[in-house]
Amino acid sequence: MSEKFSATLRIGDLNDYIAPSQGCVIKAENVGKTRTAPKAAQNEPVKISLKDCLACSGCITSAETVMLEKQSLDEFLSNLNKGKAVVVSLSPQSRASLAVHFGLSPLQVFRKLTTLLKSLGVKAIFDTSSSRDLTLIESCNEFIARYKEKYPADDEKSKSSLPMISSACPGWICYAEKTLGSYILPYISSVKSPQQTIGAAIKNHLCEELCIRPEEIYHVTVMPCYDKKLEAARDDFVFQVDSDGEKVTEVDSVLTTGEVLDLIQMKSVDFTTLEESPVDKLLSNVDEEGHLYGVRGSSGGYADTLFRYAAKVLFGKEIEGPLEFKTIRNADFREVTLEVDGKIVLRFALCYGFRNLRNIVTKIKSGKCEYHFLEIMACPSGCLNGGGQIKPNPGQSAKDLIQLLETSYSENVLVADPFENPRIKRLYNEWLGQPGSDIAKRYLHTEYHPVVKSISSQLQNW
Ligand code: SF4
């Protein structure tokens, strides 16, 4: 069982706990209910752990009933005084949510949070736009390899390595591992999410520059959803410093944007007038003139970046300006294609929300999916709409809020090629070597595992 979180419930009305399409739903008022079950099983508590979560938005993401002890604001605050160097990595989606809430620009939010967190004892605050560039470069490299494998130059039989599916959304990964199982997993990109690549970079490389041992760093990320807490808790993202050394996690704790707002309110800070501090540039996408920079795309820009790169590397086509994504079924399912000599050679799609996601995985299973790449995100509208973001104001519709977030997200952010990012070039020069190198594979890639649901297996017997 996970040490991070556990809950106990009695075997009760299955429908209260497991909805076929929505996974595990735990409601406080239902916990402890009992219903007819074999004698031996009656009153036997069934243990569920964080690993049983399907990230279905039914319990964890609504945050109504479950406290993730090691992933809470209290835990973060208590670690400020434990002698460890606390490092915070801020997501651009969280930055946009706070910016809209306070009527500030994303850069102002970054600077003000730097003031606030450093006043509490945080050693450094970075920006996951930088590690997203690292993730994107590795993903570009992986896509080219998969495409060449699928369409070999010689007569060798192609392997079914496409569509490649993005891996940055833990809601999607949970669903794939726990509900879809082994057939889908080979399609998922092996590259870790930006949350985990920044954790890997801090604890395996930058710690040396900061002259701190990895086990002495307490690394916290600020993310738009609760599902990122599940991701950080995966065993795959724990490593041992040496043969008898203690285990180190890439990300020790995840705070949602809403929890950071709670922190601001708890400390009675007037955030709008708070002084602005210079940001830590070591691993942040801020240039020498103080401008934010990054890729297009508020859910990571995977489809956008990989499409441009593949068009250039595979077909010699440079694409300038925004890509024209065409709406297919609804605003959350859009595609972009590249034609060469009248033939579609690249077909990419953005696929957000479980409704679209289920349709596309059915096509993959039946061998009828024509896409080469899918940017899959569990939340409708993508990461700006994550369950951990600040809620709409009274009277404000979710749609209006998303619109404001989209505008703020890219406000004054210079569009930049990840391959030209000086912070990331430095990581390759000093640490990783080339994209896709053995070192990059060791630290920046991961594996997925089909999971037998432990609740189901225990309930099978009655
Ligand atoms: S799509 Fe939603 S669940 Fe997935 S990473 Fe983004 S905010 Fe989290």
Image: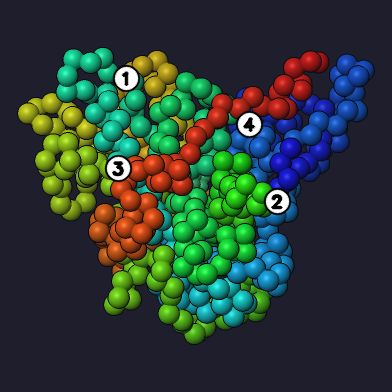
Name the element at disc 2: loop
Give residue 68's mark.
2
Q: Residue at x 30, y 42 (%)?
A: 140
Where does label 3 land, which residue? Answer: 140
Which quadrant of the view contains residue 160? top left
Which circle's residue, 4 or 1, is located before the other in the chain?
4
Name the element at disc 1: loop
Tell me the kind of residue under disc 1: Lys
Quadrant where the N terminus is found in the figure: top right
Using the image as rendered, state which of residue 231 and residue 156 is in the foreground.
156
- Decide: marks 3, 4 in contact (CB < 8 A)? no
On the image, the x and y values in percent for residue 303 come to 31, 42
**Drawn side of residue 250 relative to residue 187, left or right:** right
Label 2 C-beta lies within 8 Å of the nearest ligand 1 atom: no
Which circle's residue, 2 or 3, is located before the other in the chain?
2
Q: CA distance from mark 2 to mark 1?
A: 41 Å
Q: Is residue 104 above or below residue 332?
A: below
Q: CA distance from mark 1 to mark 3?
A: 19 Å
Q: Residue at x 26, y 14 (%)?
A: 157
Where does label 1 land, which residue? Answer: 159
Q: CA distance from mark 2 to mark 3?
A: 34 Å
Which circle's residue, 2 or 1, is located before the other in the chain?
2
Which circle's residue, 1 or 3, is located before the other in the chain?
3
- Decide: marks 2, 3 in contact (CB < 8 A)? no
Which circle's residue, 2 or 4, is located before the other in the chain?
4
Whether residue 103 appears in this view of the structure is no
**Drawn side of residue 8 relative to residue 250, left or right:** right
- Crowd class of label 3 (few under 14; some 14 to 19; many from 20; radius 10 Å): many
- Decide: marks 2, 4 in contact (CB < 8 A)? no
Where does label 4 land, which residue? Answer: 23
Quadrant where the C terminus is found in the figure: top right
Tell me the kind of residue under disc 3: Cys
